Amino acid sequence: MVRETQRRLALLAIVGVVAVAWAAAFTSTGVTPIASAAPAPAPPRVTAARVAPCPFPAALRPAFEAAATDAALPPALLWAVAKIESNLRADAESAAGARGLLQLMPATARSLNLKIDEPRSNVLAGARYLRQLLDRFRSSDLALAAYNAGPTAVAAAGGAPSAGVLRYVSNVNLLWTSVAGCR
Protein backbone atom coordinates (compact mmCIF):
# COMPACT_ATOMS: atom_id res chain seq x y z
CA MET A 1 0.00 0.00 0.00
CA VAL A 2 2.89 2.39 0.71
CA ARG A 3 4.25 1.78 -2.78
CA GLU A 4 0.89 2.62 -4.35
CA THR A 5 0.69 5.88 -2.36
CA GLN A 6 4.20 6.84 -3.41
CA ARG A 7 3.36 6.14 -7.05
CA ARG A 8 0.22 8.29 -6.89
CA LEU A 9 2.08 11.15 -5.17
CA ALA A 10 4.84 11.00 -7.82
CA LEU A 11 2.25 11.06 -10.62
CA LEU A 12 0.46 13.98 -8.94
CA ALA A 13 3.77 15.87 -8.60
CA ILE A 14 4.56 15.32 -12.28
CA VAL A 15 1.12 16.58 -13.32
CA GLY A 16 1.60 19.62 -11.06
CA VAL A 17 5.06 20.41 -12.49
CA VAL A 18 3.76 20.09 -16.07
CA ALA A 19 0.78 22.34 -15.28
CA VAL A 20 2.99 25.01 -13.70
CA ALA A 21 5.49 24.83 -16.57
CA TRP A 22 2.70 25.07 -19.14
CA ALA A 23 1.11 28.05 -17.37
CA ALA A 24 4.49 29.78 -17.03
CA ALA A 25 5.22 29.25 -20.73
CA PHE A 26 1.94 30.86 -21.81
CA THR A 27 2.26 33.74 -19.32
CA SER A 28 5.82 34.66 -20.28
CA THR A 29 5.10 34.71 -24.04
CA GLY A 30 1.98 36.80 -23.69
CA VAL A 31 -0.22 34.05 -25.16
CA THR A 32 -3.60 33.83 -23.52
CA PRO A 33 -5.18 30.40 -23.24
CA ILE A 34 -8.27 30.19 -25.43
CA ALA A 35 -10.56 29.48 -22.50
CA SER A 36 -9.87 32.89 -20.95
CA ALA A 37 -9.36 34.90 -24.14
CA ALA A 38 -11.53 37.96 -24.48
CA PRO A 39 -11.95 40.17 -27.51
CA ALA A 40 -9.41 42.97 -27.68
CA PRO A 41 -10.79 46.34 -26.72
CA ALA A 42 -11.28 48.76 -29.57
CA PRO A 43 -8.49 51.32 -29.86
CA PRO A 44 -9.47 54.72 -28.51
CA ARG A 45 -10.65 57.21 -31.11
CA VAL A 46 -8.32 60.11 -31.46
CA THR A 47 -10.03 63.38 -32.24
CA ALA A 48 -8.55 66.80 -32.61
CA ALA A 49 -9.55 69.28 -29.95
CA ARG A 50 -11.54 72.14 -31.35
CA VAL A 51 -10.58 75.62 -30.27
CA ALA A 52 -13.34 78.17 -30.48
CA PRO A 53 -12.57 81.28 -32.47
CA CYS A 54 -12.30 84.50 -30.49
CA PRO A 55 -15.41 86.61 -30.96
CA PHE A 56 -13.58 89.51 -32.60
CA PRO A 57 -15.44 91.41 -35.28
CA ALA A 58 -14.02 90.15 -38.58
CA ALA A 59 -12.65 93.56 -39.54
CA LEU A 60 -10.76 93.85 -36.24
CA ARG A 61 -9.44 90.28 -36.00
CA PRO A 62 -6.02 91.08 -37.57
CA ALA A 63 -5.54 94.05 -35.23
CA PHE A 64 -6.33 92.02 -32.10
CA GLU A 65 -4.21 89.04 -33.20
CA ALA A 66 -1.21 91.25 -34.05
CA ALA A 67 -1.50 93.20 -30.78
CA ALA A 68 -1.83 90.02 -28.71
CA THR A 69 1.30 88.60 -30.33
CA ASP A 70 3.22 91.88 -30.00
CA ALA A 71 2.43 92.26 -26.29
CA ALA A 72 2.49 88.52 -25.47
CA LEU A 73 -1.07 88.64 -24.15
CA PRO A 74 -3.93 86.19 -24.61
CA PRO A 75 -6.22 87.42 -27.41
CA ALA A 76 -9.21 86.66 -25.18
CA LEU A 77 -7.96 89.13 -22.56
CA LEU A 78 -7.69 91.93 -25.12
CA TRP A 79 -11.15 91.14 -26.43
CA ALA A 80 -12.61 91.19 -22.90
CA VAL A 81 -11.01 94.56 -22.09
CA ALA A 82 -12.25 96.06 -25.38
CA LYS A 83 -15.73 94.63 -24.85
CA ILE A 84 -16.00 96.15 -21.36
CA GLU A 85 -14.26 99.43 -22.25
CA SER A 86 -16.06 100.33 -25.49
CA ASN A 87 -18.38 97.46 -26.41
CA LEU A 88 -16.00 97.07 -29.38
CA ARG A 89 -16.84 100.52 -30.76
CA ALA A 90 -13.87 102.21 -32.40
CA ASP A 91 -15.53 105.63 -32.05
CA ALA A 92 -16.23 105.35 -28.31
CA GLU A 93 -15.19 108.26 -26.09
CA SER A 94 -15.51 108.47 -22.32
CA ALA A 95 -16.40 111.53 -20.25
CA ALA A 96 -12.77 111.56 -19.05
CA GLY A 97 -11.50 111.73 -22.64
CA ALA A 98 -10.41 108.11 -23.17
CA ARG A 99 -10.97 107.07 -26.77
CA GLY A 100 -11.22 104.09 -29.06
CA LEU A 101 -11.71 100.37 -28.70
CA LEU A 102 -9.48 100.07 -25.65
CA GLN A 103 -10.36 103.51 -24.23
CA LEU A 104 -6.89 105.01 -23.96
CA MET A 105 -6.15 108.47 -22.71
CA PRO A 106 -4.40 110.61 -25.33
CA ALA A 107 -1.33 111.01 -23.09
CA THR A 108 -1.00 107.23 -22.77
CA ALA A 109 -1.16 106.76 -26.54
CA ARG A 110 1.40 109.54 -27.06
CA SER A 111 3.75 107.91 -24.55
CA LEU A 112 3.53 104.72 -26.62
CA ASN A 113 3.98 106.71 -29.84
CA LEU A 114 0.73 105.35 -31.29
CA LYS A 115 -2.36 107.01 -32.77
CA ILE A 116 -5.39 106.70 -30.54
CA ASP A 117 -8.04 107.21 -33.24
CA GLU A 118 -6.90 104.46 -35.61
CA PRO A 119 -8.46 101.14 -34.48
CA ARG A 120 -5.37 99.01 -35.23
CA SER A 121 -3.08 101.47 -33.45
CA ASN A 122 -5.54 101.83 -30.55
CA VAL A 123 -5.63 98.07 -29.99
CA LEU A 124 -1.84 97.86 -30.15
CA ALA A 125 -1.47 100.77 -27.71
CA GLY A 126 -3.94 99.16 -25.31
CA ALA A 127 -2.12 95.83 -25.52
CA ARG A 128 1.28 97.39 -24.90
CA TYR A 129 -0.05 99.49 -22.01
CA LEU A 130 -1.69 96.44 -20.43
CA ARG A 131 1.60 94.52 -20.83
CA GLN A 132 3.42 97.35 -19.01
CA LEU A 133 0.88 97.18 -16.19
CA LEU A 134 1.16 93.38 -15.95
CA ASP A 135 4.94 93.64 -15.77
CA ARG A 136 4.70 96.32 -13.09
CA PHE A 137 2.01 94.80 -10.85
CA ARG A 138 2.64 91.09 -11.59
CA SER A 139 -1.06 90.34 -11.20
CA SER A 140 -3.77 90.41 -13.84
CA ASP A 141 -6.30 91.77 -11.32
CA LEU A 142 -4.03 94.63 -10.27
CA ALA A 143 -3.07 95.36 -13.87
CA LEU A 144 -6.74 95.49 -14.88
CA ALA A 145 -7.50 97.76 -11.91
CA ALA A 146 -4.64 100.03 -12.99
CA TYR A 147 -5.87 99.99 -16.58
CA ASN A 148 -9.22 101.26 -15.33
CA ALA A 149 -8.29 103.58 -12.46
CA GLY A 150 -4.68 104.41 -13.28
CA PRO A 151 -1.49 102.88 -11.88
CA THR A 152 -0.96 105.68 -9.36
CA ALA A 153 -4.38 105.12 -7.77
CA VAL A 154 -3.84 101.35 -7.57
CA ALA A 155 -0.35 101.74 -6.09
CA ALA A 156 -1.61 104.26 -3.51
CA ALA A 157 -4.55 102.07 -2.50
CA GLY A 158 -2.56 98.83 -2.62
CA GLY A 159 -5.26 97.38 -4.85
CA ALA A 160 -8.50 98.44 -6.48
CA PRO A 161 -9.28 101.92 -5.16
CA SER A 162 -13.07 101.64 -5.38
CA ALA A 163 -16.01 99.28 -5.69
CA GLY A 164 -16.46 100.43 -9.30
CA VAL A 165 -12.94 99.33 -10.15
CA LEU A 166 -13.56 95.97 -8.47
CA ARG A 167 -16.69 95.54 -10.62
CA TYR A 168 -14.67 96.45 -13.72
CA VAL A 169 -12.00 93.85 -12.91
CA SER A 170 -14.66 91.23 -12.17
CA ASN A 171 -16.51 91.94 -15.44
CA VAL A 172 -13.32 91.73 -17.52
CA ASN A 173 -12.33 88.48 -15.79
CA LEU A 174 -15.79 86.96 -16.39
CA LEU A 175 -15.64 87.75 -20.09
CA TRP A 176 -12.02 86.69 -20.35
CA THR A 177 -12.63 83.29 -18.78
CA SER A 178 -15.77 82.77 -20.88
CA VAL A 179 -13.64 82.77 -24.04
CA ALA A 180 -10.29 81.68 -22.59
CA GLY A 181 -8.22 79.69 -25.04
CA CYS A 182 -9.95 81.09 -28.11
CA ARG A 183 -7.88 81.64 -31.23
Image (spheres, helix red, strand yellow):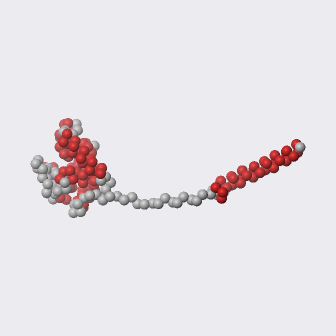
Q: Residue at x 27, y 55 (%)?
A: 75
Q: How many marks?
A: 0
Q: Is residue 119 visible?
A: yes
On the image, the x and y values in percent for residue 176 come to: 27, 50
Residue that protrudes farthest toward the top in the picture: 157
On the image, the x and y values in percent for residue 45 come to: 47, 60
Q: Quadrant of residue 156?
A: top left
Q: Is residue 105 above or below residue 155?
A: below
Q: Quadrant of residue 122?
A: bottom left
Residue that protrudes farthest toward the bottom in the picture: 59
Query: Horizontally, is 1 left or right of 56 in the view?
Result: right
Towards the viewer: 159 or 2? 2
Q: Residue at x 10, y 48 (%)?
A: 95
Q: Is residue 66 visible?
A: no
Q: Quadrant of the C terminus?
A: bottom left
Q: Quadrant of residue 169?
A: top left
Query: Horizontally, is 110 left or right of 170 in the view?
Result: left
Q: Residue at x 30, y 50 (%)?
A: 177
Towards the viewer: 173 or 33? 33
Q: Quadrant of the N terminus?
A: top right
On the image, the x and y values in percent for residue 171 come to: 24, 47
Q: Residue at x 54, y 58 (%)?
A: 41
